[in-house]
Image (cartoon, helix red, strand yellow):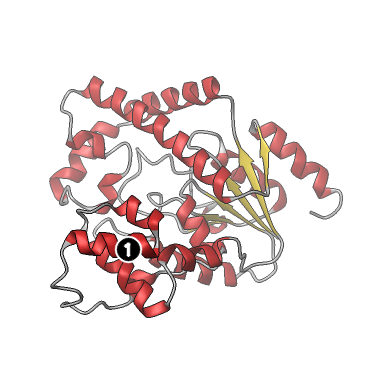
Amino acid sequence: MIYAILGPTCSGKSDLAEKLSLDFNFPIINFDAFQVYKEIKKGTAKPNITEENKSRYYLYDFVSIKDNFDVMNYQKIGRETLKKFNNDNVILVGGTGLYLKALLFDYKFMDEEKMPDDYKKDSTNNDLYEELLKIDENDALKIGQNNRKRLLRALYIYEVHGKSKSELNDNGKDKLLYENVTFIGLDPDRDELYNLINKRVDKMFENGLVEEVKELFSHYDNSLRAFQAIGYKEFLVEQNIEKVKELIKKNTRNYAKRQLTFFKNQYKNVIWFKNIDEAYFYFKNKSYNGL
């Protein structure tokens, strides 16, 4: 059985995964986009991985921030990792909905296909936009008239596949590639969640986030993908530390809202719980039947 633990940041997902892993001896596989990076630590709320317990953790701290790691890379290595366990029980935990979707569902990447350099070179942006409106109105409205690169890509995908990008993705949206997947969601009350967010951010600063950021920014290009993580990107736009802290809290709250919206829209068969104790009690009951 694959148990996927999802929910907004600070809801207790990692703590629940750790508790279940200890009690039932399940390995834990990460699907958080920023916890994969080795160099960033203080701002990503990684679980406490020690020499004693690291054999239970997979896909944490294995990518350098200098590497161009993305969802396509994650899909490949994530599926390879799942293969190691065959039909054994395993826990997936994280907050990056697209990574989980790419891992478990028949999610295709059309952007891998090479588009000719001169594709529709004589068409204006308005021409491209009007053409895409007829094919996929939603995608056209989402892209807008000024993003020529994405308009061209969307039209090229339709020309190659005979279907719009939305249709191709929707075909695999609900098609699980694995049997026996249980989705466990944590959705605390908003006031409680926001209080947990504030406490976590305060703790990040107490644990040396400012010093870590200064060290990283002095050694690496600030435009790296890894520095777009909440907890790091705020230092690129604000100098006052107290304002940085408040900005991180605000961005984290907004991110939590987006996460919940994504998970609730994409996954209709999630078993939702208000807190770790409720979710753990559910597992304990199931354990009497061998999970």
Which of 187 and 86 lies nearest the eye of the viewer? 187
Please state the horizontal and vertical placement of residue 133, each as a whole percent of the image: 34, 59
Tell me what residue is drawn at x 35 percent, y 53 percent.
37
Tell me what residue is drawn at x 50 percent, y 48 percent.
94
Please state the horizontal and vertical placement of residue 212, each as a whole percent of the image: 25, 38
Please state the horizontal and vertical placement of residue 236, each as a whole percent of the image: 18, 37
Q: Amino acid at mark 1?
A: Leu
Q: Find numbered disc 1 in the image and state the secondary structure of the residue it sits on.
A: helix
Q: Is residue 111 visible?
A: yes
Please state the horizontal and vertical placement of residue 274, each as a whole percent of the image: 65, 31
Q: Which residue bears the numbered disc 1?
A: 132
- Name of the residue lying farthest toward the right: 289
Q: Is residue 150 visible?
A: no
Asked if 10 appears above or below 5 in the picture, the reply is above
Asked if 219 appears above or below 171 in the picture, the reply is above
Whether residue 193 sits left or right of residue 220 in the image: it is right
Which of 74 and 120 lies nearest the eye of the viewer? 120
Tell me what residue is drawn at x 52 percent, y 56 percent.
100
Which of 283 and 122 lies nearest the eye of the viewer? 122
Whether residue 85 sits left or right of residue 134 in the image: it is right
Local crowd size for mark 1, using a 10 Å CA cut-off: few (<14), some (14–19), many (≥20): many
On the rendered image, what quadrant is the N terminus found in?
Answer: bottom right
Asked if 33 appears above or below 175 in the picture, the reply is above
In which quarter of the view is residue 215 placed?
Answer: top left
In which quarter of the view is residue 242 placed?
Answer: top left
In which quarter of the view is residue 116 placed?
Answer: bottom left
On the rendered image, what quadrant is the C terminus found in?
Answer: bottom right
Tell me what residue is drawn at x 49 percent, y 62 percent.
102
Asked if 11 appears above or below 164 in the picture, the reply is above
